Amino acid sequence: MMRMILTLTLVAGLLAAGCRPGAERDGRLSVVASAYPLAEAAERVGGRLVDVRDLTPPGVEPHDLELAPDDLAEIVDADLVVYVGAGFQPAVEDAVGQAEGRTLDVLSVVPTLRVGGAIDPHVWLDPERFADVVRALAEALAEMDPAHRATYRQNADAYVDELRAIDEAYRAGLASCRSRLLVVSHAAFGYLAEAYGLRQEAITGLSPESEPDPARLAELRDLVRAEGVTTLFTEELVSPAVARALAEEAGVRTAVLSPLENLTPQEVEAGEDYGSIMRRNLRTLEVALGCS
């Protein structure tokens, strides 16, 4: 807490001195996004009318994000801060209260699920919910910049059409599968599971940093064997060691399933985005679940 107070004091000093990091943007709205999916949505909706800053660098697990003084200054100065609440990124939630512009917690615009009593923040893994986030972003930008309202709405409609196509691909691809059980590293896939009639069982809860419980590991080993699961799912930004050990003990393989919390540097270099990774996830699921 003391570090946060000192950092915010530094930010206040920077702003008072005229060192506002977002002050010169050629007339564009400044948008700060706390995580990759929100940054992509803001860029797609705002286009050339916005300047978007993603607080979470590629390759960083967003749950672990710590804010530098420049990050805090960006939050204070932004026209719009779009973020994920419910403890997904505590440092961002602490700083949002200092924002001088508008803020949007994306969990406030969609129906949410709970895991162990806590709100699941991973709403973007359901394309329909993510479409609601996109529309809310468009309206927020339109209210701040009414002269370009039609542009924001048109851009949002185009992006929502892409999300609708992804949703349709998932519904078709996962319609008939030998198994509907997802055994995953952490409980990030609840919205995807609900949307497509799957069942999620996770090694740890909503935070990938949680320590796995030995009793839970034994329970999952027995479940995997009993239900004929062939694949345990790991993630790019979380150590796969525990999942691999469990898979070896249960006699099954592992495959990467992205929770799309962020991109890796390699994915950025390859030009990957939300749509390409969601479709890659679908191909992974079709193979792992025996879909036809």
Image: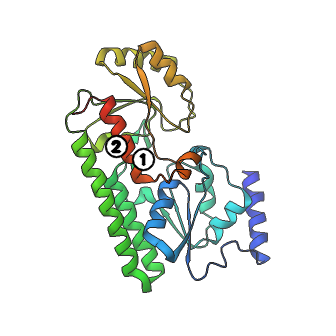
From the top left corner, tell me how far across and down residue 173 is, in percent: 25, 41
Q: Quadrant of residue 180?
A: top left
From the top left corner, tell me how far across and down residue 263 is, in percent: 53, 48
* Residue 46 shown left or right of residue 94 in the figure: left
Residue 141 higher or lower than 67, as above or below: below
Q: Which amino acid, by three-letter code, is at mark 1?
A: Ile
Q: Quadrant of residue 230?
A: top left
Using the rendered image of the protein, determine whether residue 264 is visible from the camera's viewpoint: no
Identify residue for label 1: 277
Dot 2: what SS?
helix
* Residue 193 shown left or right of residue 6 in the figure: left
Q: Nearer the viewer, mark 2 or mark 1?
A: 1
What color scheme is it? rainbow
Q: Nearer the viewer, residue 91 or 150?
A: 150
Quote the CA–CA distance across marks 2 and 1: 14 Å
Residue closest to the far front: 270
From the top left corner, tell me how far across and down residue 134 is, in percent: 39, 64
Q: Nearer the viewer, residue 265 or 152?
A: 265
Residue closest to the far bottom: 147
Callouts 2 and 1 close, C-beta under 8 Å: no
Residue drawn at (39%, 81%) of the image: 149
Which mark is drawn over residue 192? 2
Dot 1: what SS?
helix
